[in-house]
Image: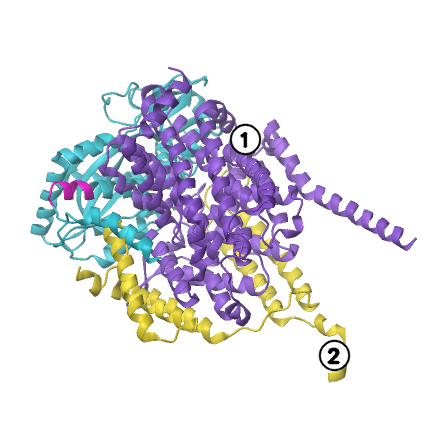
Amino acid sequence: MNTFELLGQGLLTALQWSNLLYALIGVTLGTAVGVLPGIGPALTVALLLPVTYRLDPAGSLIMFAGIYYGGMYGGSTTSILLNTPGESASIVTALEGNKMARQGRGGPALATSAIGSFIAGLVATLGLAFIAPWVVQFALSFGPSEYFALMLLAFMTVSAAFGDSTLRGLTALFIGLALGLIGIDQLTGQTRLAMGTPNLFDGISVTTLAVALFAIGETIAVVASKTAMDEKIEAVKGSVWMTKQDWARSWKSWVRGTAIGFPIGAMPAGGADVASFLSYSAERQFSKHPEEFGHGAIEGVAGPEAANNASAAGTLVPLLTLGLPTTATAAIMLAGFQQFGLQPGPLLFVSNATLVWGLIASLLVANFMLLVLNLPLIGLWVRLLTIPRPWLYAGILTFATLGTIGASASTFMIGPLPTSFELGLLLLFGLLGYLLRRFGYPIAPVVVGLILGPMAERSLRQALQISQGDPTVLVHSWISIVLILLAVAAVFVPMILRARGKGQMLSAMAGDED
Amino acid sequence: MRHFIATALAAGSLLVASQALAADYKIMAPAAPGGGWDQTARTMQAALQDEEISPSVQVINVPGAGGTIGLAQFVNQSNGDPDALIVGGYVMVGAILTNGSPVTLDQVTPIARLTGEYEAIVVPASSDIQDMAGLVAKLKENPGGVSWGGGSAGGTDHITAGLVAKAVGVDPTKVNYIAFSGGGEALAAILGGQVTVGISGYSEFSAQIAAGQLRLLGISSDEKIEGIEGPTFKEGGVDVAIQNWRMVAAAPGISDEQKAAISADIEKMVKSESWKKAVADKGWADTYLAGDAFAEQLKEDTASTETILKDIGLVK
Amino acid sequence: MSVLDDNPTRERRPDWAAFAIAIVLGIASAAIAWSTYNAGGIATTQPVGPKTVPYIVAACLFGLAIWTAVEALRGDFPEREEQQTAPIIWVVGGLIVQMLTIKTIGFSLATALMFTATAYAFNERRVWLTLPFGLVFCFLVWLAFARGLQLSLPAGPLERLF
């Protein structure tokens, strides 16, 4: 049988009534848990996986796909509406999305996110079906030196893209980098900056930091500010649906986001967060309305959300073809496959063709189901904003602390009193988030630094170790050279453009004087 | 928001409907949800409940520092509690030493080794190294020139690499070990030809070996394993055998009767159909070993691990 | 004097709070460098060891501290709105109480206290309404996640009843 026949057969299985029902339940459950602030897709999938155990393989797989997509979509919903991302990949979504929601444009923001996710998921799943072997070859050609070049590019573009002050953007980034140093150094096993506290040996959890800086920091900032407290949030201003202009501005971003997200997701050390950061900076570069960035630019939601979803499908490329789980969510999915005796790897497409194509078909169906379910529900989601503030924020903090303590139940003794260490960190970083907001520092670079810093350091040291100290290894392949050149361009091209822009403006002013 | 809770509750009640709420086991998984120890704990949970050995079993995740944070908490808080269990493994032995952990495995009551996995050394199919002898020759010629890709520093993979070097007379501190954040990332580096050899648990490589993308140079078991085509380290001329095992232990300070009762429950679980099926599904090897034999082996492992970690230079 | 203060240079006054940030950054930089310097060295043949990057980060943070100090003294930081401190204390206090008590009195009770304190901070003063609601809400959440979905959440006297 060829690929098309196999996919068709898979789709026929997935489209049976009972399986559609499982997909519906999966999407609903995934959205319901994923939408809780502070609970990201990885935790959602881990929590709901056991629910699928009781079904037959096909039904279980399809419900699982639904949970997966539902969890991701639910996470973006709260990021946009409440500015409380539960994981690193939806931080970028919160940046522009929440600004839109505050202007009463939460509806279009959710819509562009849903449609962008759908298109990206569709394209990337088809990519998974048809070009996975080539993508994986490309991804494997990335060794430590190529990753280091990619991280350089990410740093350069990302730090240039955030905030309006270079000083404060860089400071935020370096706070993140410093936090990233804490814990056991993976290459030598040496503990760094942990102040002798074993709870810090594994470093600062990205989720804890993200939830603290956003959910807790946001809550304190709102409650402390008289204007924010008096401000009336209008859930809907204008249409809840996307306007013609929204469509025109979104579709290119969806395409770009997909193009960035899929290959990066497929890389063994990539991930949805890196993809969404890069997509955000790309959108800022390409946008015809760069002045709107930071104030609710729809491209800044459309691109990263598409990238996020495309990279999630991209993650399945190494998972299915190599048996390589590259993210926390993928590792949990691997556990999900194993319950059916499925061992992902190079032989999977040969030995278990029916189930694999069934899974790919399930992903397509779940993706579609999500769109069908959620587009009509957007009007309902934005009503979240109409919950009176005391109840809303008390609820946000309840779920933020629940997600944090649920992932790590470690106890910290203060004298005879057992306390929760992770909640202590959450509070500490929450206060940091408030102070950063108060002094006009951007928040996202802190998390970016925490994620990219250790990756960059590791890649650099691995590369040098493999070459036994020869630094030319960093430019040994054309991929690294191209990436490094791009990184250099990312710094200098905007400078040159700005200089030229200024020049034109100066000449225009001179012209006026004439 | 109450609506979602209702939905979640409805899903939840499906799971709890059949469970009575009597005195039950609490299993600590000193790892994050999804990891190997967490899966072991949750598989135990399912088997104990399905076989009605225990009416309701709770799993508590306390991740961090190779399991030593969970271990410390377990030792401090569960003293004398006959319901408390902890899952652990060989990685913990190394982590206790490298992290300078204040508590050790001497302070818990070992019950049984449950599953185990052997370390495999592989090269890409295109590599010019054909067998263990070829690797040994290369290693002796230029120790730094052979880069080993495996899991994090001080873990089982690193320890095995050090043991192999030592056994063939190469200075273990000269081993050019490249730590990746887990077997998966290491696998990518091996397949991509970034490192000379790969070293990790056999299951990380089994699919690629079967597909002919990787060549298995040796496996760290004492004797040949059924279903694995390839020599052991010993057959390849390297006198090293190591097993990355997972175990279950009970709280410190429990009475002998309590220990016997737990041991009986665990034995019943290990012999049950649902445990056997789950272990097979997950591709684990059942290396059940209980009682004094296990305690003995634990002591041996601790001693040999301490020596090699000192040789590598990770522990002073 | 007051007349003089009204001229436009008033905005360019040193911003002492921002200057404090510069000092904190400087201290952090020194702490990282000091801690790295004192960490025990281990046998390594690597050219870029575990200490290289911490030193680089410390150096950059130090540079940023000086830059921040300059901007603070020139008053280049954005203007800040006046803050109400009482609500902050309520929110932070609620979180502290939850952190301290959650292991002893369980998830529902501890979180309900935090819930009530947060609602109070947001001007919902009807504690007779928020506390019982918070308790029921948190308990339902506990039931759903701890019992239903097997998430490990600390149990206290209330949870043990069920």
The residue segment tinted magenta is B45-53
Question: Residue A338: where, in percent of width, then height?
Answer: 29, 32
Looking at the image, residue B242 sits to the left or right of residue C94; the answer is left
Q: Quadrant of residue A125?
A: top left
Query: Quick check: can you spot residue B176?
Result: yes
Chain letter, disc 2 residue: C
- Point 22% across, 40% down: residue: B43
Cβ–Cβ below 8 Å for labels 2 and 1?
no
- Residue C147 lies, with reference to residue A482, above or below; the image says below
Quadrant, the N terminus of chain A? top left
Say whether residue A377 is magenta: no
Q: CA distance from mark 2 to mark 1?
A: 64 Å
Residue at the extreme top of the image, as rendered:
A1
Looking at the image, residue A165 sits to the left or right of residue A205; the answer is right
Which residue in the protein does label 2 denote?
A: C6
Mark 1: amino acid: Ser
Question: Residue A512: where, in percent of width, then height?
Answer: 88, 53
Q: Quadrant of residue A37?
A: bottom left
Which residue in the protein does label 1 denote?
A: A467
- Chain B: its colour in the image is cyan
Q: Which of the labelled discs sits on residue C72, or is there none? A: none
- Residue A166 lies, with reference to residue A57, above or below; the image says below
Question: Residue A409: where, in percent of width, then height?
Answer: 31, 55
- Chain A: its colour in the image is purple
Question: Nearer the observer, disc 2 or disc 1?
Answer: 2
Chain letter, disc 1 residue: A
Number of numbered discs on residues: 2
Q: Which chain is yellow?
A: C
Given residues B186 and C41, the one toward you in this image is B186
Query: Quick check: can you spot residue A328?
Result: no
